[in-house]
Amino acid sequence: MIEIEIEIEDAAWTKALPDPQALVRRAAEAAAADAVGDIVILLTDDVALQGLNGRFLGKDRPTNVLAFPDASPDRLGDVALAFGVCQREAAEQGKTLADHTTHLVVHGVLHLLGYDHLADDDAARMEALERRLLAAMNIQDPYADVRA
């Protein structure tokens, strides 16, 4: 069974989305349907993600989503999303913030489950799974514009 804890650090999430906790929970449950363990999802701001990105990946810039897998048997790990980056990307890509956030939560949780996109084959497998999960939630293919 999957246990999901959602922490909202940046109030912008609750102002921009009607029920960010429900949206994030639905996405995480879809991605981790057969998994066992705990996940913490942090909805925060760009400054916090920039700090995490710098500290753990050596990149001094904010990013949309970071995933931190945990090797212990009862914890899958943590996922963190930056409001400003997510909102800006959604606008640039012509997507709703809700759909983009759902995609990024699915993406982050799949990282916790061992999926990655460093090699082309791995990226294709991960993206195909993301597309299937999102389609089941009536969300358009987030990679459609990339292929066009």
Image: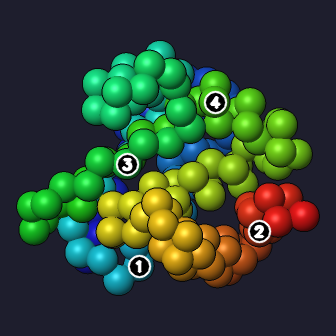
Kindly indicate the quadrant of the structure image that contains residue 11: top right
Residue type at mark 4?
A: Val
Q: CA distance from mark 3 to mark 2?
A: 21 Å
Q: Are marks 4 and 3 in contact (CB under 8 Å)?
A: no
Residue type at mark 2?
A: Asp
Secondary element at tag 2: loop
- The image position of residue 141, as x and y in percent, is 77, 68
Q: Which residue is mark 3?
A: 67
Q: CA distance from mark 1 to mark 4?
A: 27 Å
- The image position of residue 25, as x and y in percent, is 48, 58
Taking the spot 52% from the left edge, 25% from the top edge, the residue there is 62
Taking the spot 74% from the left edge, 30% from the top edge, the residue there is 88
**Mark 1 or 4: the one toward you:** 4
Taking the spot 57% from the left edge, 44% from the top edge, the residue there is 20
* Residue 114 seen from this side: yes
Please rate how many residues cluster around mark 1, counting C-alpha atoms within 10 Å: few if below 14, some from 14 to 19, many from 20. few
